[in-house]
Image: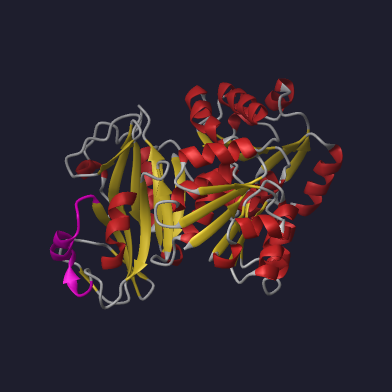
Amino acid sequence: MRVIIVGAGQVGSSIAADLADEHDVIVVDCDGDRVEELNYSLDVLAVTGDGTSVSTLEEAGIDDADMVIASTDDDETNLVICSTVKAVSGAFTIARVKQTEYLRTWEGSERAFGVDFMVCTNLLAAESIVRMIGLPAARDVDPFAGGKVQMAEFEVDEGSPIAGQTVEEADRFDSLTFVAILRNGCVEIARGKTVVEAGDRAVVIGSPESVQEFARSVDPEETAGAAEEVVIIGGSEIGYHIARLLEERGFKPRLVERDEERARELAEELPGTVVMKSDATDIEFLEREHVGDADIVVSTLDSDEKNLLVSLLAERMGVERTIAIIDTGEYVDLFETVGVDVGVSPRGVVAEEISRFTREDDAENIALIESDKAEVLEIEIGEESVLAGRPIRESMGDLPDGIVIGAITRDREYVTPRGDTVIEVGDHVVLFGGIDVLDGVTAQL
């Protein structure tokens, strides 16, 4: 495809890097220095100019474009870009927005604003965090096959019962497949004799029930469920959505908001949440409200530095697990090194969602692992698939090393993949593998 990406910030650059190998990518941005940097760092054509301008879009080749992705940091600008594109071409448009009001309007109409597909940064970040709250020790959770299958990534701490065990010993669950170990920035396919070491991240694919059981084996001291006490620091849009989604799942979270008017508004909109007006860096308040007894503290303030400070305070007070919103993606690893248990970059989450959508021609669903080094891919098996009508043990011989079949669903029912399992036409298969490996064989699958 010929893809025009307007906005060369973290989101746009990440999407461009993901698509550049297989598509003709043009990036548009007003920042000439950023444009020049992309020309050197990525195999893309970069154009300096205003993406809302027809002349700039024409310079970028809008007449031949198949898709335009509006990924600037301003919602209204992205909507104007899509509207302008629709006025001059038939390109498919994708808009990134932060405010859910635009998403609701778009969902309630037919392609409002000239947008064919819309992603909401704040909502996606909140959904990602809520999925992690439901699983002890989880760093990432993605649903597949309509929720019948989950992929989850777990941190293995020094005190974890599975630290020092082989994969064969740790994988004791019927409908679970241990697919990979992430160690020192590298992705290793999990073999039976592979030893799980403290500090590793384990990637598993299985039924939600088995993934939940495995989570308890990784960290038995944490018990996931609605009884967990969750404290949300900051009544931002993300904080609001986290509380709302937790309420829907039976949780009774507490939320701390400094601004009195915003706190009152949140109290009215969140009947199942205890909203407290205070400065979350006030240690006396935190001690008085026993925040240290919480199972999870999620910090969603408007500053990366404030979120780091709150997370470190919470950890010092005895909170079991801290999750922080980190707006600057480059800080995620740093913040996790100095004490935040899980850092979530909203920009990174939305970049992955857009990249996933643009690559779903050959797949039902995709999740990216370890900075795009590997991926989990859901495909529906057709008659021409190398997997169709054959036992897994036999068909895998025709595929390169490094591909693992993690799960199968048939007629919406979970099927545990084993060597003698015969995959049928119409099955949904969830696979794991390195991006380079999977990209090379997707057509066979």
Which residue is pictured at 73% across the width and 53% down the height? Answer: 77
Whether residue 225 is visible, yes or no, is: no
Whether residue 149 is visible, yes or no, is: yes
Q: Quadrant of the C terminus?
A: bottom left
Residue 207: x %, y % from top left: 37, 59
Q: Is residue 385 above or below residue 316?
A: below
Which residue is pictured at 29% across the width and 32% down the height? Answer: 163
Query: 46 left or right of 402?
Result: right
Residue 348: x %, y % from top left: 54, 44
Q: Is residue 396 magenta?
A: yes
**Front residue of 63 and 109:** 63
Which residue is pictured at 59% across the width and 31% down the height? Answer: 293
Residue range in magenta is 388-402
Query: 413 left or right of 122?
Result: left
Q: Is residue 404 magenta?
A: no
Residue 68: x %, y % from top left: 59, 60
